[in-house]
Image (spheres, rainbow, N blue to C red):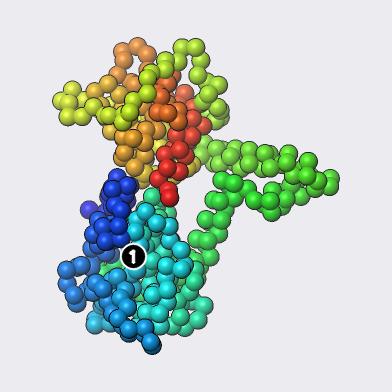
Amino acid sequence: MEFEERLVALAAKVQNQRDAIQTEEATKNAFIMPFISTILGYDVFNPLEVVPEFTADVGIKRGEKIDYAIVRDGEVQILIECKASMGQLKIEHASQLFRYFAVTNARIAVLTNGQVYNFYTDLDAPNRMDEKPFLVLDLADIDETLIPELKKLTKDVFDLDSVISAAEELKYVGALKREIAAQFREPSDEWIKFFTSRVYDGAYTQKVRTQFTTLVGKAARQFLNERVNERLKSALGATALPVSSAVDAHGPSAVQSQPVADLDIEQNSDEIDTTLEELEGYQIVKAIACAEVKPQRVVHRDAKSYFAVLLDDNNRKPIARLWFNGKKQKYLGVFDAEKVETKIPIDSLDAIYEHAETIRASVRLHASNSVL
């Protein structure tokens, strides 16, 4: 497989197995060793490449161990400290990394819980690990712009100088992107006041603040919707329809089915025939969902009766169903928070755009449940 395919495969494994992994040791075996071997390309069973439980005495600290040290040409290049997959990563977890960074030749340190990988170097002071990572890789939401930099740390093309030279820009661009994303999700008082001052000439009173808190959030969502529609228009060569509330679009002809516990997908049927129209419908749903998550997280599974679109290839995370096998009427299946499916009659693929907000709401619900 190509590098990106291996990364997506590991991300799917983490999402599917994470709830079953309860300890740090299990996290290492299930997620982190595969990351070192299949993503970075180092032989985890060759002590000349990967040293588990690496020891380097530091001052009065004796016998402390770092989880993994990656070695090239006899020199330690990367240090990796692991935490249990169910725990959040905090800088307090990196105390051993700080100490070991100063007494080895390593220029890269990694703190990970198997899903999130925080990469550190020494931008602020030579031979002293920074407190903030220059690269954050989240397998639940892979930032494709980071993939070229991650490749530079692999065994085949290891290019430390290039990584270090790009680290400062990566550090601040990544931090800015995460902050912007956070502001779009939940605008801060400063963000609201900044934009209010650009469009409103009156005094910034509590009443105005309350009013513009709603307006700024609404404007941000509409802005993202418009950008998605522009991308859809470019990708599909057709005019993207305005995004409207899918709840309003559920007319009297919509059919609501009962909730399904695990939303099992029909499998292994010789009668399954994936059509071009189903794939085109999938691309529309995927493009809509990409306003919330990375494209590689949105996958499809065809069944005899319907065509399912899922988050993380998990049938417990349904985004939509395409009921296109009927001879006369086609339906779009959308889900509420209880996984109750509503089948909405549609006359064309363009009608899927009218239910974009409901599709995104399903994605947000499943994505939020995937994050600690």
Q: Position of residue 38 (x, y in %)?
A: 24, 60
Q: Quadrant of residue 256?
A: top left
Callout 1 amino acid: Cys
Q: Residue at x 41, y 24 (%)?
A: 340
Q: Is residue 200 above or below residue 142?
A: above
The quarter of the displayed image where residue 207 is located = top right
Residue located farthest toward the right when viewing the structure as drawn = 202
Give the vertical position of 21 relative to 310 (above or below).
below
Tell me if residue 39 can be seen: no
Residue placed farthest to the bottom in the image?
A: 59
Question: Neighbour class for label 1 at 10 Å: few (<14), some, many (≥20)?
Answer: many
Would you say 277 lies left or right of 51 here? right
Res 170 seen here = yes
For residue 213, side relative to residue 337 (left or right): right
Looking at the rendered structure, the number of numbered marks drawn on it comes to: 1
**Residue 266 vertical placement versus 215 (above, below):** above
Q: Secondary structure at mark 1?
A: strand
Image position, residue 314 (x, y; %): 31, 38
Question: Residue tagged by mark 1?
Answer: 82
Percent of width and height locating residue 107: 38, 77
Q: Residue at x 39, y 74 (%)?
A: 97
Q: Quadrant of residue 290?
A: top left
User: Residue drawn 52% across and 56% down?
Assistant: 178
> Is 372 left, or right, of 302 in this rendering?
right
24 to 98, vertically: above or below: above
Foreground pick, 263 / 107: 263
Given residues 291 and 95, the one toward you in this image is: 95
The answer to whether 278 appears left or right of 173 in the picture is: left
- Nearest to the observer: residue 85 or residue 366: 85
